[in-house]
Amino acid sequence: MSLKIIGMGKGIPERRISNHELAGFLDTDNEWIVSRTGIENRYICTTETLTGLSACASVQALENAGMSVSDIDLVICATIGGDFKTPSLACSLSEQIGAKCPAFDINAACTGFIYALDVASGYLVTGKASNILIVCAEIMSTQVDWNDRKTCVLFGDGAAAAVVTSGDMLKYISLSVTADTSILNMPSSTGNSPYIKDKRDIGYLHMHGQEVFKFAVSIVGPQITQALDTLCMSAQNIDWYIIHQANKRIIDSIRTRLRQPEDKFPVNIGNYGNISSVSIPLLLYEMLEDGRLKRGDTLFLSAFGAGLTAGSCVFTWE
């Protein structure tokens, strides 16, 4: 499918917030959060901007790829919202790192990285781009209601970047939407228009956790079956199952259904929480850095998020 990843990077805020710190102003405690989610810490922006985190991840990814920004001919940012409503985060990032190529955002919520890979693959196949910078970046701390313990404890901030070019790493990719905006959404403000009858102030993220859990568990199984059947593979042929880091219990449930060993399902949600589109590329970056991910490994990536979007892909790492 004419795609391979040749460099990755991350951008994480300095301030780490533990469950114990949250318990200082929320009606919650460490045991409650860990037992239900697997999350112990998350990183939250204080002085950082999303553009700045994205630039940090991008510079690192370019260095790891052995490229300069002038080599990039397309920038794709996956985010639910940058530092501005307009221009896009991709344009803001391009200004900061000096990119001179086309740049745009996509919003597929937590599935953003896989959607971005699919878009990038199309550009590479058609020859419209040769070297593409994909950046996933989220500042979830500004999107949640910090008076709602059910949601604010789940999320963190950060960015992760990947430089992709032509290659044979990507073996399979599939995207889907089960259209339902009621389960997980973040309403926008209506502003101060005198003509809008039903006014809405700034909106916070709303989530029906049990429904998201059910959707995630129900969608990933068929995703895996479809991918394996298409590639004439079995579950044992996958070396790593990289599942969106939304909730440790979701990952454990998927693993139990597949009857695969726990060490095939790497997690970092305990340290970062749910960073939406960032979670999968951040986990890939960490696996590269600590040597777990090796040439020839076969990976199954799966994500799910607001929309309800879903996506999966299979890599043979080069």
Image (cartoon, rainbow, N blue to C red):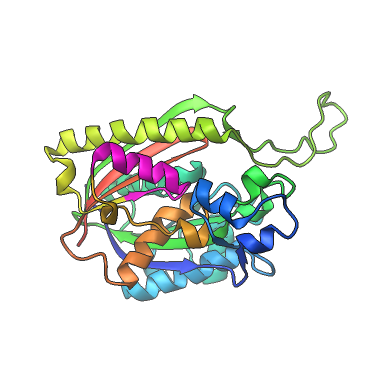
Vertical placement of 261 versus 71: above or below?
above
The quadrant holding residue 217 is top left
Vertical placement of 257 versus 125: above or below?
above
Q: Is residue 155 visible?
A: no
Q: Main secondary structure of the magenta part?
A: helix
Q: Is residue 247 magenta?
A: yes
User: Along the line of sight, which residue is nearer the eye, 137 or 252?
Assistant: 252
Question: Relative to 83, is 161 on the left or the right?
Answer: left
The single residue placed furthest to the left in the displayed view is 232
What residue is at 55 percent from the left and 66 percent from the top? 53
The quadrant holding residue 95 is bottom right
Q: Position of residue 271 (x, y in %)?
A: 49, 63
- What segment carries the magenta color? 242-259
Q: Position of residue 59 (x, y in %)?
A: 45, 72
Question: Relative to 227, is 204 on the left or the right?
Answer: right
Q: Position of residue 138 (x, y in %)?
A: 56, 54
Question: Relative to 186, is 318 on the left or the right?
Answer: left
Question: Relative to 41, is 198 on the left or the right?
Answer: right
Vertical placement of 210 versus 10: above or below?
above
What residue is at 44 percent from the left and 48 percent from the top? 248
Q: Position of residue 222 (x, y in %)?
A: 29, 31
Q: Is residue 253 visible?
A: yes
The single residue placed furthest to the front in the displayed view is 31
Q: Is residue 274 magenta?
A: no
What residue is at 34 percent from the left and 74 percent from the top? 64
What residue is at 42 percent from the left and 42 percent from the top? 250
User: Along the line of sight, which residue is nearer the eye, 208 or 311?
Assistant: 208
* Quadrant housing the C terminus: bottom left
Could you tell me how many numbered marks the image carries? 0
